[in-house]
Image: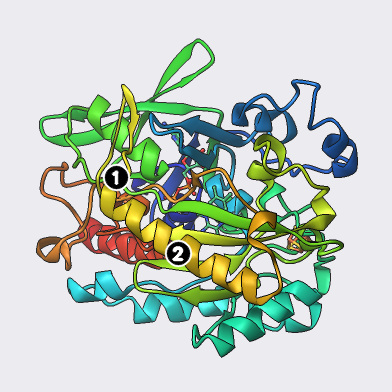
Amino acid sequence: MKTAIVVGSGAGGATVARELQGAFQVTVVEAGTAFKPFTGNLHVYEKLRRGTGLFANEKRIEWLIPAMRTRATQDGMVIVRGVCHGGSTTLSTGTASRQDRELNEIGIDLDTEFLELAREIPINTDHEATWHTPTQEAFSICREMGLEPQPTPKMLRRVRCVECGRCILGCAHGAKWDSREFLNEAIENGAELASGHRVREVVIEDGRAIGVLATSGRRTRLFNADLVVLAAGGLGTPVVLQQSGIECDNSLFVDPVFCVATRWEKAMQNREIPMPFMVQQEHFMMSPYFDFLSFFFNPAWRYPAADIFSLMIKLADTSSGSASPKGVRKPLLDIDRARLEEAVNICKDILHRMGTRETDIFLGTLNAGHPGGTLPLTERESQTLHRTSLPDNLYVADASLLPRSLGNPPILTIMALAKKVSKACLEHAG
Ligand SMILES: Cc1cc2nc3c(=O)[nH]c(=O)nc-3n(C[C@H](O)[C@H](O)[C@H](O)COP(=O)(O)OP(=O)(O)OC[C@H]3O[C@@H](n4cnc5c(N)ncnc54)[C@H](O)[C@@H]3O)c2cc1C
Ligand code: SF4
């Protein structure tokens, strides 16, 4: 049987591994190790927030969840990703949003793939009965303002969900779906997992990929294969490619997240399904969201967790950054800042209509968790899903392929695209 290496086990990698195992003998090479959700008593950590130095900067979040890695850009934006089995999907809010307009515009039709995913993943919008009072009020006000709020589809098994609100700290109840489920299916079907192996480069000989070089501790190992699929995520894949001598575009987007919050006694938003509804605007979306990152690390979030109500803005940012072995560069352009300001004003308007005074409003830490776009697909690749700058038997199947920022949760779309890439790989292998 032919062999395939899949690098990464997040949204893209786990999907490809599941699709290819059987036709290929697949080995998933994953930098991280098994994911552990945070199961400690958050109330204890809440008390330690101030004055102990324990939460001096966002990097310390790794003390709570080792898989959650952060890095700050020059502008102070904190970029978050998951390095573990399941990648960033383990940290997700479980939001399942179909966002393929840009892909459609360049001739990529993912209807079949979305239909397959709808059969394979538990997707649930029936959670309105669990919303707390401020969320219900915000929903009604958004409706009155003509913002057309919609309950959010969630990758969720409702019967197992205890509405603890900790989705981004990992679900300890097996309720939230993440890509470890696809990874496990691939393994049950015979795929191998090389855990804790960070891929440095793709080894290319005579124009063909012959495998990948990966390090684990002090050891370096060559994994040989007939086919290599990179899915190390929007920050990982461009680094591996550049270390293999293949250029990427300076078109990184990250979907910046910014929260507008207020003191609201017993809002209990910290114990509610995150992002219960969404409001879509042209360049951003908004949703109720308790931001743990701001809560632990931003001094403006000084109230008890139970007494904060917050609205999140997710911006579709300009493709203006880069991810390279030297680091991540992601400046926010003036147009991005102007759009962010427009969104902040709408959020404030919603909070004011809910009865909040301007002086009770405080802002969150600018952060981001949807990096991608450095190997964007264009019309030219709409049939092959393969860039000509890559060797014939080297594919990419993660957020790096997205043509533009979605300004929206991308997991479902990345997985649909990864399924399509898998089909292209199978066709190519004949
Ligand atoms: C806090 C948070 C909440 C989010 N919530 C949502 C949500 O509700 N809905 C949604 O749609 N999206 C959400 N996202 C975004 C979503 O998780 C990511 O956009 C998506 O998982 C990206 O998929 P990917 O395959 O590109 O990369 P990832 O899922 O990040 O997978 C990359 C994998 O590659 C591995 N890797 C990296 N470098 C290497 C290397 N050199 N060698 C080997 N392995 C490597 C990583 O460990 C990881 O397993 C959220 C993100 C964050 C951070
Ligand atoms: S809210 Fe539900 S899905 Fe989210 S972590 Fe808690 S139990 Fe899991």
The crowd level at tag 1 (other Cα within 10 Å; few <14, some 14-19, many 20+) is: many
Q: Left or right: where does residue 108 sit relative to residue 339?
A: left
- For badge 1, the amino acid type reads Leu
Q: Is residue 314 above or below residue 321?
A: below
**Left or right side of 365 for 132:** right
Asked which quadrant contains residue 144, the reply is: bottom right
Q: Is residue 308 above or below residue 95?
A: above
Helix, strand or loop status at disc 2? helix
Report whether 14 appears left or right of 173. left
- 52 to 208, vertically: above or below: above
Residue 408 seen: no
Q: Is residue 270 visible?
A: yes
Mark 2 surroundings within 10 Å by alpha-carbon count, few (fewer than 14), some (14 through 19), many (20 or more): many
For ligand 2, the image quadrant comes to bottom right
- Residue 211, position as x, y percentages in the image: 31, 32
- Mark 1, ligand 1, within 8 Å: the answer is no
x, y percentage for residue 127? 73, 79
Location of residue 96 with respect to 219 vertically, above or below: below
Q: Position of residue 59 (x, y in %)?
A: 60, 28
Q: Quickly name the residue at label 2.
A: 343
Which residue is rendered at x = 22% and y = 46% of the image?
393
Cα distance, mark 1 to mark 2? Answer: 22 Å
Q: Nearer the viewer, mark 1 or mark 2?
A: 2
Residue 401, percent across and down? 28, 54
Quarter where residue 242 is shown: top left
| Mark 1: secondary structure | loop
Q: Which residue is mark 1?
A: 252
Badge number at residue 415: none
Farthest residue in the top direction? 218
Residue drawn 79% across the image and 32% down it: 49
Q: How many marks?
A: 2
